[in-house]
């Protein structure tokens, strides 16, 4: 699968410094819906750090019933402060789920708070409607605010 983007015009000033990574969970509808069961993405790199995205298709233990949770995890040995947010687009490219950006310090892996969870990322029913050929595609937007 390849991804391309065409920009028209100049992006707004607050768009500078943001990167986007797409994480695909193929066969989302068949993933376990048991609360607190997670599916990890492969590692990906951003701002010189290694990351994984944990997906809880049935929600994390503190999620509201019927919600999917996602957790961004710093897998590097140094801490970093970033702003980050998430989107899910349908097969037509329309943004169906938007999770407002947040800013947090991610501690080094193995020490302290190295992950932050969106407990109520989106209703599972909304995600099911937004699958692309059966896959959940989550856009992770990140901007480094300090290292």
Image (cartoon, rainbow, N blue to C red):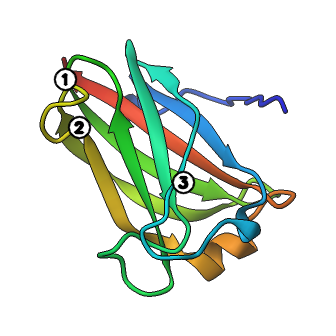
Q: Secondary structure at mark 1?
A: loop
Front residue of 120/58: it is 58
Q: Residue 133: horizontal and vertical position, in percent?
A: 87, 57
Q: Nearer the viewer, mark 3 or mark 1?
A: 1
Front residue of 87/112: it is 112
From this view, report whether residue 140 is shown above or below residue 51.
Answer: below
Q: Secondary structure at mark 3?
A: strand
- Give the CA distance from mark 2 to mark 3: 21 Å
Q: Residue 92: horizontal and vertical position, in percent?
A: 82, 57
* Residue at 20% over, 25% down: 108
Quadrant of res 29: bottom right
Residue hosting label 1: 79
Q: Is residue 75 visible?
A: yes
- Labels 1 and 2: the sequence-earlier one: 1
Give neighbour class at mark 3: few <14, some 14-19, many 20+ (Cα, 10 Å).
some
Asked whether, in this view, residue 41 is left or right of residue 111, the answer is right
Are the residues tagged 3 and 1 within 8 Å (C-beta)?
A: no
Residue hosting label 3: 87
Are the residues tagged 1 and 2 within 8 Å (C-beta)?
A: yes
Are the residues tagged 2 and 3 within 8 Å (C-beta)?
A: no
Q: Residue 123: horizontal and vertical position, in percent?
A: 53, 78
Quadrant of res 41: top right
From this view, report whether residue 45 is shown above or below residue 48.
Answer: below
């Amino acid at each position: 699968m390849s991804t391309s983007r065409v920009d028209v015009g100049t992006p707004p000033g607050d768009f500078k410094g943001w990167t986007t990574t797409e994480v695909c969970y193929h066969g989302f509808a068949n993933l376990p819906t048991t609360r607190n069961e997670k599916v990890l993405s492969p590692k990906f790199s951003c701002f010189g750090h290694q990351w994984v995205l944990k997906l809880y298709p049935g929600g994390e233990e503190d999620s509201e019933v019927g919600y999917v949770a996602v957790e961004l995890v710093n897998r590097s040995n140094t801490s970093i402060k970033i702003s980050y947010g998430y989107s899910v687009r349908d097969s037509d490219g329309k943004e169906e789920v938007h999770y407002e950006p947040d800013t947090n310090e991610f501690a080094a892996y193995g020490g302290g708070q190295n992950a932050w969870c969106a407990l109520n990322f989106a209703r599972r029913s909304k995600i099911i409607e937004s699958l692309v050929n059966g896959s959940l595609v989550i856009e992770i937007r990140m901007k480094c605010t300090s290292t």
